[in-house]
Image (cartoon, rainbow, N blue to C red):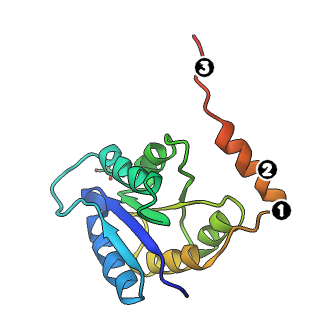
């Protein structure tokens, strides 16, 4: 597998998993940009999601990884940015399909809900699978046009 540029962040609940994946993915030949957090002191997941969204927007990295306790907060936060397609995944199959069908550019994991071995397998699947395009292309394009605020 060719090394990818990966930007990673977590909150305190995802810190341990982030450190583990940073080390593993670096050893596998990827270039990892770790934008925090750097300890288990409490921080707010929207602030960490923003840093990854910014890095992807600035093309500092090809893909991102975000980790909080369940992955849910990171998922909500990351997907508020129109250029982010963040996928909260629980197993390698979901990680593969997130790339193949959704062209996801951010992998989202739950540090308290997924074990490290599964997280590593999810990362490997996410980093090796490619977007299939075809019938999935126009659906993903539709996502890019979805930016609605409902009026009261
Ligand atoms: C932090 O305690 C926890 O709420 C957060 O990591 C995340 O799980 C939120 O979705």
Q: Quadrant of residue 128?
A: bottom right
Q: Earlier in the sequence, mark 1 or mark 3?
A: 1
Marks 1 and 3 sit apart, C-alpha to C-alpha, by 31 Å
Q: Quadrant of residue 114?
A: bottom left
Marks 2 and 3 sit apart, C-alpha to C-alpha, by 24 Å
Q: Can residue 109 be seen by looking at this rendering?
A: no
Residue 12 lies, in percent from the top left, at 24, 58
Category of crowding for the residue at label 3, using alpha-carbon neighbours closer than 10 angstroms: few (below 14), some (14–19), many (at least 20): few
- SS state under label 1: helix
Residue 34 lies, in percent from the top left, at 29, 67
The residue that disc 2 covers is 138
Residue 100 in the figure: left or right of residue 10: right
Q: Can residue 102 be seen by looking at this rendering?
A: yes
Residue 51 lies, in percent from the top left, at 34, 51
Marks 2 and 1 sit apart, C-alpha to C-alpha, by 8 Å
Question: Is the CB–ligand 1 distance for label 2 below 8 Å?
Answer: no
Residue 120 in the figure: left or right of residue 12: right
Residue 122 in the figure: left or right of residue 34: right
Q: Residue most toward the top?
A: 152
The residue that disc 1 covers is 134
Residue 34 in the figure: left or right of residue 110: left
What count of labels does the image hold? 3
Q: Nearer the viewer, mark 1 or mark 3?
A: 1
Query: Residue drawn 49% across and 65% down?
Result: 63
Category of crowding for the residue at label 1, using alpha-carbon neighbours closer than 10 angstroms: few (below 14), some (14–19), many (at least 20): few
Q: Observer-nearest residue: 98 or 68?
A: 98
The residue that disc 3 covers is 150
Q: Quadrant of residue 105?
A: bottom right
- SS state under label 3: loop
């Amino acid at each position: 597998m060719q090394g990818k540029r990966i930007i990673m962040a977590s909150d305190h609940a995802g810190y341990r998993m982030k450190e583990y994946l940073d080390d593993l993915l670096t050893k596998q030949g990827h270039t990892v940009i770790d934008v925090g957090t750097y300890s288990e002191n409490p921080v707010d997941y929207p602030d960490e999601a923003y840093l990854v969204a910014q890095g992807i927007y600035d093309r500092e990295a090809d893909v991102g990884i975000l980790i909080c306790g369940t992955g849910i907060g990171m998922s909500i936060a990351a997907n508020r940015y129109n250029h982010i397609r963040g996928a909260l995944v629980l197993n390698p199959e979901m990680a593969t399909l997130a790339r193949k069908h959704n062209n996801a550019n951010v992998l989202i994991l739950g540090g308290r809900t997924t074990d490290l071995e599964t997280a590593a397998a999810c990362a490997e699947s996410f980093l090796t699978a490619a977007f299939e395009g075809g019938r999935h292309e126009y659906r993903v394009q539709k996502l890019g046009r979805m930016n609605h605020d409902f009026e009261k």
